[in-house]
Image (tube, rainbow, N blue to C red):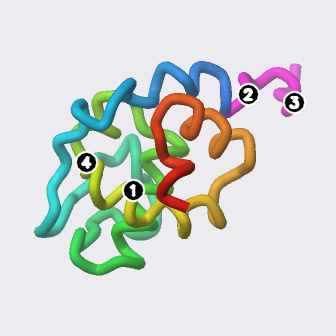
Amino acid sequence: MSLTADMLPSRYEGAEERVPQSFDEFYGPTSGVVQLPNFLAWSGMTAFDVLVDVERVHMYQILIDVGRRIDVAKFMDAGLLQQDWPMLRRLLPKQMIVIWESRLPLASAV
């Protein structure tokens, strides 16, 4: 039996539970280099300088897409997320934007 796309779960399944309920849950760094674990960044860049906007936005995009709630809280800073949200909105799928903006007051950052 071969695997088909309809046999796989949706990437949005359970996404709401992966988003922290408030900005108080975020405790990620505001400087330094973050080395994401292999289960989050398995190809391409795996280390991201938080002070370099393009690297941080790329890391946040990965975390929003595949990170668990604990990963999001550990590696993302609430202030930097709000600062980067306008750019992230351009990069993320609409469904993910809706999920994140329904859980956190990010729409005001746009």
Amino acid beneath label 2: Ser
**Residue 56 location (% of width, % of height):** 35, 68
Which one is closest to the eye, mark 2 or mark 3?
Answer: 2
Where is 28 relative to 100, above or below?
below
Amino acid beneath label 1: Gln
Amino acid beneath label 4: Phe
Give the spatial CA distance, label 3 vs label 1: 37 Å
Upstream in sequence: badge 4 or badge 3: 3
Amino acid beneath label 3: Thr
Check disc 1: other Cα within 10 Å, few if <14, some if 14-19, many if 20+.
some
- The local secondary structure at tag 1 comes to helix
Which one is closest to the eye, mark 1 or mark 2?
Answer: 1
Upstream in sequence: badge 2 or badge 3: 3
Check disc 4: other Cα within 10 Å, few if <14, some if 14-19, many if 20+.
many
Residue 76 visible in the picture:
no
Q: Residue at x 36, y 74 (%)?
A: 55
Quadrant of residue 69 within the rendered picture: top left
CB under 8 Å between callouts 1 and 2?
no
* Residue to which mark 2 is pinned: 10
Which one is closest to the eye, mark 2 or mark 4?
Answer: 4
Upstream in sequence: badge 1 or badge 4: 4
107 with respect to 59 (left or right):
right
